[in-house]
Amino acid sequence: MSEVLTAPLVVEFPFTRSLGPVQSAFLTGLRERTVLGVTASDGRVVVPPTEYDPVTAEEIRDLVEVGGAGTVTTWAWNSSPRRGQPLATPFAWVLVRLDGADTALLHALDAPGPDAVRTGMRVRIRWAAQRTGAITDIACFEPDDGPGGGEGEARPHGDAQPVPHDGEFADPVTGITAPARLDYTYAPGRAQSRYLRALADRKTIGERCPSCRKVYVPPRGACPTCGVATATQVEVGPRGTVTTFCIVNIKAKNLDIEVPYVYAHIALDGADLALHARIGGIPYDRVRMGLRVEPVWAEDGRFPDHYRPTGEPDADYDSYKELV
């Protein structure tokens, strides 16, 4: 049995959101080394502040300033930091109840090892040298062995009382962009591994269902209609018919293709499921349903770079309408 292929895969996109008055004040406050919370209807001070009351779900805006030092309520040791985490060396994830707050804030604690961390220990904020109005303006927490709390913190341990704050700052932060990224290893399975290996030999194979006799490309190892395993391999194409398509006008990151371009569903000859691929060799506004196309491989390419028109007459709609 051939080995199943695997490959690293990254899904990444920037997540952009606007901020309401509460979150704007909180993040702008961090830029100014000020930690703000909000007072809920039951009198608790919530940090980080929420825009809606956790008890009544009503909108709340009663901002207060809390201390820059606090107490660890629980923790977990992270021995292998990953890309994008607050510290590059092993650290503890901690929930810290800042002085004056009634809820805990999740962040990193810079400690030499797990033996140096305990529930109930006092910690203080280590502010980032460059602050922009983001949660990363808190670089991390660090053990607080002195009587005065964190940097810039004048209140004694445990004595900080929340102080009303109007949430007003010069040049407030009104929006944030956070990169969302997922790194993982993709294993296509035996059926698609065979399919990918065949593409490297410039062949396209599908699998036939023993029950309904339909040929699926790319193969999935089972018939999506009947639910039975598929093992019989069938070579299809290489030519096919455009069943439907879309015109792409937004350039994707790290994709060296000029917009606009066309992405289409293509029913390969002998297949009962359309695959998707880019259409080239024709102006984007001349691509149409029924267009006959064939694959184009780049030099030393392991899969078709795109599909181009064959020059044949367009396929009759009745020949592919079930695959639209």
Image (cartoon, rainbow, N blue to C red):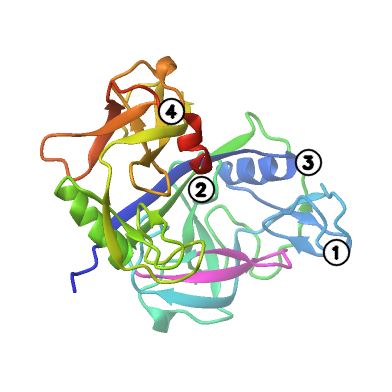
Q: Main secondary structure of the magenta part?
A: strand
Q: Which residue is mark 2?
A: 137
Taking 257 as reference, is 272 above or below it? below
**Amino acid under disc 1:** Val
- Which mark is in front, 4 or 1? 4
Q: Nearer the viewer, residue 184 or 222?
A: 222
User: Residue, x 85% and y 64% (percent of image)?
Assistant: 55
**Amino acid under disc 3:** Asp
Between the residue at mark 3 and the residue at mark 4, the CA separation in whole angstroms equals: 64 Å
- Which mark is in front, 3 or 4? 4
Between the residue at mark 3 and the residue at mark 1, the CA separation in whole angstroms equals: 23 Å
Q: Which mark is residue 290?
A: 4
**Amino acid under disc 2:** Asp
Taking 38 as reference, is 321 above or below it? above
Between the residue at mark 1 and the residue at mark 2, the CA separation in whole angstroms equals: 29 Å
- Callout 4: few (<14), some (14-19), or many (20+) C-alpha neighbours within 10 Å? many
Q: Which residue is mark 3?
A: 166
